[in-house]
Amino acid sequence: MITKPWSSGFNFQDEILRIVPVWVRFPNLPLCCWGSDSLSRIGSLIGVPLFADDCTSKQLRILFARLLIEVDVTKDLPKEVLIQDHSRVTIKQKVEYDWLPPFCKACNSVGHDCSVKKSVGARFQPAPTGPAQ
């Protein structure tokens, strides 16, 4: 659930949900980038970092760092970012999203995508009834 402060001019028809918190993974992130300042700067390349998961904060799992980041789903999100380590070496860091909400650019709304065709399932066919044998 996403909540937002109420204002007297709020109108459901005009409101577009754009900013959504999303878990973002940085696989094989160099250990020199695991400090809270470094993680915050890296997360800022994507959106507004909120916090790291417990395993990342305590460095219990070093396969990937995982941050909760507020992202604007109306914009294309990067699949990789460029970061610099302490010796100014630039690294291309892969970015993975645990889940992204569907966003329809035609309707400008979160929750569905008009461009995705829905498949029509097979209709229910009752079993033929006939004389019992």
Image (cartoon, rainbow, N blue to C red):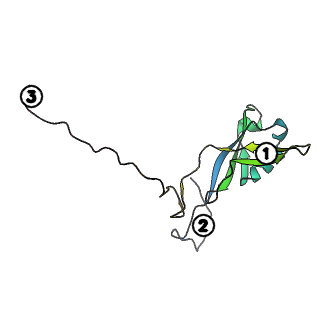
Q: Earlier in the sequence, mark 2 or mark 3?
A: 2
Residue furthest to the bottom:
9
Q: Residue at x 74, y 37 (%)?
A: 56
Tag 2: residue type? Answer: Trp
Q: CA distance from mark 1 to mark 3?
A: 71 Å
| Residue at image point 90% right, 46% down | 88
Disc 3 crowd rating (10 Å Cα; few below 14, some 14-19, many 20+) is few
The extreme right residue here reads: 87
Q: Mark 2, mark 3: which one is toward the viewer?
A: 3
- Could you tell me if the residues under marks 1 and 3 are in contact, i.e. CB atoms within 8 Å? no
Q: Nearer the viewer, mark 2 or mark 1?
A: 1
- Element at label 3: loop
Identify residue for label 3.
132
| Rendering coords of residue 59 (x, y %) | 77, 34
**Residue ID for mark 1:** 39
Say which residue appears at 39% left-offset and 48% top-offset: 119
> Which quarter of the image is occupied by the C terminus?
top left
Mark 1, secondary structure of its residue: helix
Badge number at residue 6: 2
Distance between mark 2 and mark 3 Cα atoms? 66 Å
Residue 95 percent across, percent down from the top left: 70, 44
| First-in-chain label (1 vs 3) | 1
Tell me where residue 87 sits by quadrant. top right
Q: Residues within 10 Å of mark 2 (few under 14, many from 20)?
A: few
Q: Is residue 81 left or right of residue 127?
A: right
What is the secondary structure assignment of the residue under circle 2?
A: loop
Q: Amino acid at mark 1?
A: Leu
Q: Earlier in the sequence, mark 2 or mark 1?
A: 2
Name which residue type carries label 3: Ala
